[in-house]
Image (spheres, rainbow, N blue to C red):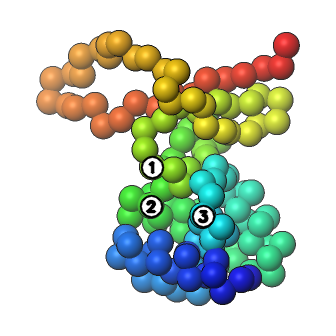
Amino acid sequence: MQKNAEHRGTDWLSSAGLRPTRQRVALAALLVGDGMDRHVTAESLFASARAAGEGVSLATVYNTLRAFCEAGLMSEITVDGSRSYFDTRLDDHPHFYWEDSAELTDAPKDQLQITALPKAPEGTAVARVDVVIRLRRA
């Protein structure tokens, strides 16, 4: 793994106050090492880590992604009850979910208009609104 990617990953972890363990740095470098935003599943990140020669278990990848979310470094987008994606882009934005390839991509934020939301039940507040637009090739 390139030192620049590791450095970027370490800085990313430090920005959230997370201890830069070897496995966290390796996964962070894969996620943000090139400066690009990512949508990954635990399985796809695990495959990337294995391809890069990193000795991490799938359970470690799941636990690390959850820790990154809890630290505010990523957000989890659930597209159905059995599949979650983890997004390194943190601003509010919609997503396209491509049903034929099971891929999640960013949708144009400036083209989305939400004019109203239902009132939250008493004693609650809206934490966030996830917009996932499911696509099927015509």
Answer above or below: position of 44 versus 79.
Answer: below
Q: In terms of sequence position, does the residue under pointer 3 or pointer 1 come before the other?
A: 3
Helix, strand or loop status at disc 3: loop
Can residue 9 be seen here? The reply is yes
Q: Nearer the viewer, residue 30 or 102?
A: 30
Q: Position of residue 15 (x, y in %)?
A: 38, 72
At label 2, counting other C-alpha atoms closer than 10 Å, the crowd grade (few under 14, some 14-19, many 20 or more) is many
At label 1, counting other C-alpha atoms closer than 10 Å, the crowd grade (few under 14, some 14-19, many 20 or more) is few
Q: In terms of sequence position, does the residue under pointer 3 or pointer 2 come before the other?
A: 3
Instruction: Place residue 128 in its image quadrant.
Output: top left
Can residue 82 be seen here? The reply is no
Instruction: Identify which amino acid the numbered label 1 is placed on.
Output: Leu
Mark 3 sits on what residue?
35
In this rendering, which labeled residue sits more in front, label 3 or label 1?
3
Residue at screen point 66% across, 38% down: 105
Helix, strand or loop status at disc 2: loop
Q: Position of residue 71 (x, y in %)?
A: 38, 64
Residue reaching furthest to the left: 123
Mark 1 sits on what residue?
90
Dots 3, 1 in contact, CB < 8 A:
no
Q: Is residue 112 left or right of residue 138?
A: left
Instruction: Identify which amino acid the numbered label 2 is placed on.
Output: Leu
Real-space Cα separation, disc 1 to disc 2, in angstroms: 8 Å
Q: Position of residue 2 (x, y in %)?
A: 71, 83
Q: In terms of sequence position, does the residue under pointer 1 or pointer 2 come before the other?
A: 2
Mark 2 sits on what residue?
73
Q: Nearer the viewer, residue 1 or 117?
A: 1
Real-space Cα separation, disc 3 to disc 2, in angstroms: 14 Å
Q: Is residue 1 left or right of residue 130?
A: right
Q: Position of residue 127 (x, y in %)?
A: 30, 37
